[in-house]
Image (cartoon, rainbow, N blue to C red):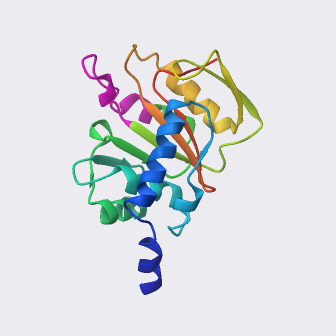
Amino acid sequence: MAEEIRSVYQFDFVHDAQKVFRELLSAMANPGQIREIKKQAEKFTGDYAALLALGCTLLDNEEKMYVEKNPGLSSELHNLTLCKEADLDQADYVFLSSEMNYGSMEQILKNVRHGTYADPQESATIFLLCGQVEGEETMTLKGPGVKGERKLPVCPYIKKVIRLRNNLEIEYPLGVDLVFADRSGNLIGVPRLIKLD
């Protein structure tokens, strides 16, 4: 138990959180560009280290989170950040700790906060843990932050989730920000206004 506690608190909530935040910001400002938080994620144990590093960077007692079907991850995020869990449609941040079937994923995308016309930035951010972010499927992204278009090789799951989000045809400027992370600590950000070609 003492070893587990020591391991959890190797993550520095100031310096490590700043590094994670910079990488996350860079991932969102440069859609489709792979960023890395491996060193910070390694300071946690278990399968959800990347999600814990992201959660400890963004969550506090004023934010609301939703964790899909993973009470262990929810409890750990709450214990580390004091963030309260909320219903899906009220959460600021949504954590998905496994690749979900596409029907369930579509329901989550439909029911999360999409922002309002007065405050589109009030939309939710969804963090999805994947087996890996890089893969054999070519994905082409267009939109703000992408000069012309950006092609990159990703796993099929990422491409399908972005396509599901695009198929919802949420009116501009509303939407949902997506961040894909893998167990190696790689990140890909896909902001709400980015489209898959």
Residue at the bottom extreme, as displayed? 2
Residue 1: quarter of image: bottom left
**Horizontal and vertical percent for residue 141?**
62, 22
Along the line of sight, the residue nearer the viewer: 61 or 165: 61
Residue at 46% x, 15% y: name it.
169
How many numbered discs sit on the rendered protein? 0
**Horizontal and vertical percent for residue 83?**
27, 55
Question: Magenta stretch?
Answer: 107-124
Residue at 56% x, 65% y: name it.
42
Along the line of sight, the residue nearer the viewer: 30 or 81: 30
**For residue 32, above or below residue 72:** above
Q: Is residue 157 left or right of residue 53?
A: right
Residue at 63% x, 40% y: name it.
34
Residue at 42% x, 49% y: name it.
68
**Horizontal and vertical percent for residue 70?**
43, 57
Q: Is residue 48 visible?
A: no
Along the line of sight, the residue nearer the viewer: 55 or 67: 55
**For residue 3, above or below residue 164:** below
Residue at the front extreme, as displayed? 15
